[in-house]
Image (cartoon, grey):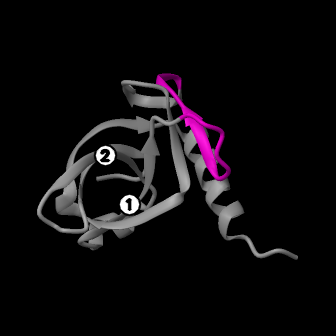
Amino acid sequence: MKQQDLVWISIPYSSLEQSKVRPAVIVSNDSYNDKSQDIVVCAVTSKLDGMPYSILIDTSNLSIGKLPVKSRIRADKIMQIEKNLVIRQFAQLNKKTFDLLTSEIVKLIQRKK
């Protein structure tokens, strides 16, 4: 599991009896990913409404794979999840798009001066 990978993850409902499968992008760095049982991801949604702290993506934003539908990465939906919740990788963001995503994360956490 590498930084920039788009993956399908199994997210348990609050009851923990069922789960749903959702796309996400791995944002934690490869060193962390190699040493930890967890990864840090941002949620990906097919809801295209203009949302702050998000970026619009399609297959042109990928270096590997295909995106089934135009989507939006939510920089404000950051989760730490166990690696065993990852079903599989299906694509990878290109460097330019990943840099846009990290810029959105920085905007989200940046302290007002």
Residue placed furthest toward the left: 17
Provide residue 56's location: percent of width, then percent of height: 58, 35
Disc 1 packing (10 Å; few <14; some 14–19; many ≥20): some
When asked about the image quadrant of residue 76, the answer is bottom right
Vertical relation: 85 (above or below) 93: below
Residue at the (44%, 44%) spot, across then down: 44
Region in magenta: 48-60
Q: Nearer the viewer, residue 70 or 50?
A: 50
Q: Say the numbered circle drawn on residue 22.
A: 2
Q: Residue at x 41, y 53 (%)?
A: 3
Residue drawn at point x = 56 percent, y = 55 percent: 75
- Give, as a three-letter code, the residue at label 2: Arg
Question: Label 1 belongs to which residue?
Answer: 30
Q: Secondary structure at mark 1?
A: helix
28 lies above or below 113: above
Left or right: 18, with 26 as reference point = left
Q: Is residue 94 above or below residue 79?
A: above
Q: Is residue 12 left or right of residue 74?
A: left
Q: CA distance from mark 2 to mark 1?
A: 22 Å
